[in-house]
Image (cartoon, grey):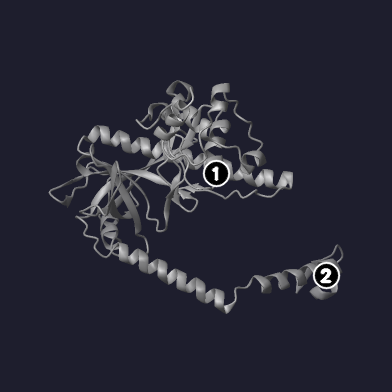
Amino acid sequence: GCVLFTARCSMFLPAPRQFRLSEETKASIKDVAVLRDELRPSSELRASLLRAARKAREQISSQWLDFSPGPPVLAKKRYFDVKTDGWAEEQVMVQLDSKAFGKGALRECFRMKEVRLESREFVGHAEGKLKVNQTTDHHLCFEAIACGLMELPRNRRRTLWVAKRSIADHHRKIMHKRECETDVIHQTFAKHYAELFNQEIHRHAVETGLGRCGAHDIDFLLTHVVELPERVTVSAEAFVLGDYRKHNTNGGSTMGPRTTPQAFSYFTFIKSGRRLMIVDIQGVLDLYTDPVIHFLPSRVSGKLAGADMELNFGIKGFALVLWSHRRNDIDQLLNLPVFALSCHEEKHLAPNSSRTVSQLIATSKKDP
């Protein structure tokens, strides 16, 4: 019921006598009810989803069967924030696998368990034992440490990560820390531009009435730096299962027929005012990781200007990607301008099936 107050007196009137639904409202409610029934998954679909969930859980469990961690240690977890151009940090307790479970050309990967702590400062550990600074007002309390130790074997608050470190240079601790920070800065900038890309796709799809033109929403894994005792540093990101694929490289090569990754790389070049270009797009489906950013330090500002790496080819990287890039439906949907090539470049365009930088250069030299 509902209480109705009038200027003369207060009296109770049943709601049905005061509030009646219009025919339009009744029709809309009926439509929503029909839509709800249509969207309700069938028993076959529910069974399929449950099977997929069980399979995913089994895959994750199998990946951690031989997890042989070292002792729990206190660590500092650091995120990079593009908007503030600074680092945010918190303290965590982690267990790092004693051996790598995978290796690439430059990095090796370790499984890592992590628990967040309600604390702000630590001083490290000695001889495998946790050591807390008792002289500061911001020290770790015993309860926080005990809670972290109890939560590591459980599932409720524990998080599973992949920790990465350089194969060749991890023993050079200061340089390796800088490399980890650079990787995190690059991937965080890539995640920022992925969000801008998705927004522009949605906006143009609605405004033009052309739909998405095959464009997919994309994202990059959120990554962070973990500083362990004894000045050991790793970068960490989520543990992802699936078919890992590479779509383009920092040398202008393209892999496969998909247009979304190629359009994204070109979009970053135009959206940044031709200051940078995000390439080396790779990952599971449209969840990417380990990008490379081509840029000139003099053309960018903030932390990115100091986060240079050997894989950044600068103007040469721009040229290789722009030479091999083919304008596609997503470029047209986003109204991205056509980048003008020289007469020589127009005459000797990179082949669509390009795979390596050497192939691109060889193609350009066939008819100088």
Q: Amino acid at mark 2?
A: Leu
Q: Is residue 15 left or right of residue 46?
A: right
Residue drawn 27% across and 63% down? 150
Structural crowding at the residue carrying mark 2, measured as other residues with C-alpha within 10 Å and reported as few (<14), some (14–19) or many (≥20) = few
Q: Residue under circle 1?
A: 195
Relative to 179, say whether 96 is above or below. below
Quadrant assignment, res 203: top right
Q: Amino acid at mark 1?
A: Glu
Quadrant placement of the N terminus: bottom right
Whole-percent x, y for residue 285 in the image = 48, 53
Dot 1: element: helix
Question: Which of the two labelled residues, at mark 2 and mark 1, occupies the earlier sequence position?
Answer: 2
Dot 2: element: loop
- The foreground one among 192 and 295 is 295
- The foreground one among 116 and 52 is 52
- The foreground one among 368 and 106 is 368
Whole-percent x, y for residue 103 in the image = 28, 48
Residue drawn 29% across and 62% down? 64
Say if residue 325 shows up in the picture: yes
Q: Mark 2 against mark 1, which lies toward the viewer?
A: 1
Q: Do the residues bearing badges 2 and 1 touch, measured as CB atoms within 8 Å?
A: no
Relative to 159, say whether 180 is above or below. above
Q: CA distance from mark 2 to mark 1?
A: 41 Å
Quadrant assignment, res 196: top right
Q: Residue under circle 2?
A: 21
Residue drawn 36% across and 57% down? 159
Whole-percent x, y for residue 319 in the image = 49, 27
Q: Is residue 111 left or right of residue 243?
A: left
